Image (tube, rainbow, N blue to C red):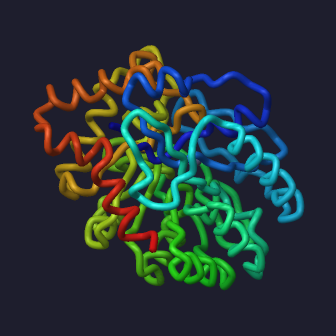
């Protein structure tokens, strides 16, 4: 059974596009039991993955709360049309069924005074990334740069601090992926829950601003948290290049093994970014997950470690975060 830290299937459905990676029939056959389904409101200018490093993309345009709130309704409606059930408890995940954690990637749909946060919680929202890689009322995201440090700008605003506290109180997971380093440390200071980066990799192996430094990994481990390994080619490869045909499953294995060596096997999971990024051609999509499991076994991870990485660690962190 696989529980996964990030997919953008809802965005594809909202745009009326076919899924690139997450065919739900193939998913069930591959042991995919669901995970975080993002409600992501795109910036006006369409985002294009950089082709090769070095690069330094400008900060994407902001989205107003009003526009985001309207589009988030449409995204939520698209999610509700999927043949999946919503996760309200870690016990909701079942082998052979697909269960979706309603995740907001970028908190623009939440009013800066948090007046609609509880209503979203009551409709099933259980995870929020305060920012995508752009600035909003809560924080400044990390722009896409390679090679560079994730320490790119200021951290949480007052509204951002209040959001983290409110999420802790309600039992909403706070996702650190797409925050810059100062934002990360601000959440680490405030949050009473395990620290979670749903879809990020090791900066030591791929020095993208989207990846996590060893110090950040230490803090995640010390909090009992987790990193979901992102399958995006640009966040895996040492050269940051968008070369899916030349990037094998072994690149995902390289990050899993590094993170497990650095933090311990209890703090690593998957964060595929299916339908949100370009992934290794050799993996292809959700149907490739069993082959990734085989590659991890071949790399020396035993059955117990594999069970933790594929689902057990996510379940532990969800139980500790939701209440
Ligand atoms: Zn993302």
Residue 27 shown left or right of residue 218 in the figure: right
Q: Nearer the viewer, residue 134 or 24?
A: 24
Q: Quadrant of the N terminus?
A: top left
Q: Residue at x 53, y 33 (%)?
A: 274
Q: Residue at x 44, y 41 (%)?
A: 230
Image position, residue 64 (x, y; %): 85, 62
Residue 43 shown left or right of residue 153 in the figure: right
> Height in image: 41 above or below 168?
above
> Height in image: 112 above or below 231?
below
Image position, residue 134 (x, y; %): 69, 57
Q: Which residue is drawn at 82% across and 57% down?
A: 68
> Height in image: 243 above or below 83?
above
Q: Which of 266 and 169 is in front in this view?
A: 169
Image position, residue 273 (x, y; %): 52, 38
Residue 18's quadrant in the figure?
top right
Q: Nearer the viewer, residue 209 or 91?
A: 91
Image position, residue 228 (x, y; %): 39, 48
Q: Residue at x 70, y 32 (%)?
A: 12
So how many labels did they put on this image? 0
Q: In which quarter of the image is the C terminus?
A: bottom left
> Height in image: 267 above or below 57?
below
């Amino acid at each position: 059974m696989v529980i996964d830290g990030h997919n953008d299937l809802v965005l594809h459905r909202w745009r009326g596009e076919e899924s690139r990676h997450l065919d739900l029939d193939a998913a069930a056959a591959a042991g995919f039991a669901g995970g975080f389904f993002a409600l992501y409101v795109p910036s006006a200018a369409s985002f294009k993955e950089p082709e090769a490093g070095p690069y330094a993309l400008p900060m994407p345009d902001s989205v107003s709360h009003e526009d985001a709130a309207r589009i988030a309704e449409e995204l939520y409606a698209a999610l509700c049309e999927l043949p999946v059930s919503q996760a309200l408890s870690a016990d909701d995940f079942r082998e052979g069924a697909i269960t979706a954690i309603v995740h907001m990637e970028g908190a623009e749909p939440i009013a800066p005074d948090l007046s609609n946060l509880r209503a979203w919680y009551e409709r099933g929202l259980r995870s929020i990334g305060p920012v995508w890689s752009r600035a909003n009322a809560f924080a400044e995201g990390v722009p896409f740069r390679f090679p560079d440090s994730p320490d790119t700008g200021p951290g949480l605003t007052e509204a951002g601090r209040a959001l983290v506290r409110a999420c802790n109180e309600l039992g909403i997971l706070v996702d650190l992926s797409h925050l810059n380093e100062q934002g990360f440390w601000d959440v680490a200071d405030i949050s009473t829950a395990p620290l979670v980066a749903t879809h990020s990799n090791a900066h030591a192996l791929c020095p993208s601003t989207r990846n996590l430094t060893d110090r950040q990994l230490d803090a995640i481990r010390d909090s009992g948290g987790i990193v979901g390994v992102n399958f995006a080619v640009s966040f895996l490869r040492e050269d940051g290049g968008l070369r899916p045909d030349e990037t094998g499953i072994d690149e995902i294995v390289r990050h899993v093994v590094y993170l497990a060596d650095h933090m311990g096997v209890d703090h690593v999971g998957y964060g595929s970014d299916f339908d949100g990024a370009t992934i290794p051609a050799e993996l292809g999509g959700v149907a490739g997950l069993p082959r990734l499991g085989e590659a991890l076994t071949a790399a020396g991870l035993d059955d117990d470690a594999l069970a933790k990485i594929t689902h057990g660690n996510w379940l532990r962190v969800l139980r500790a975060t939701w209440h």
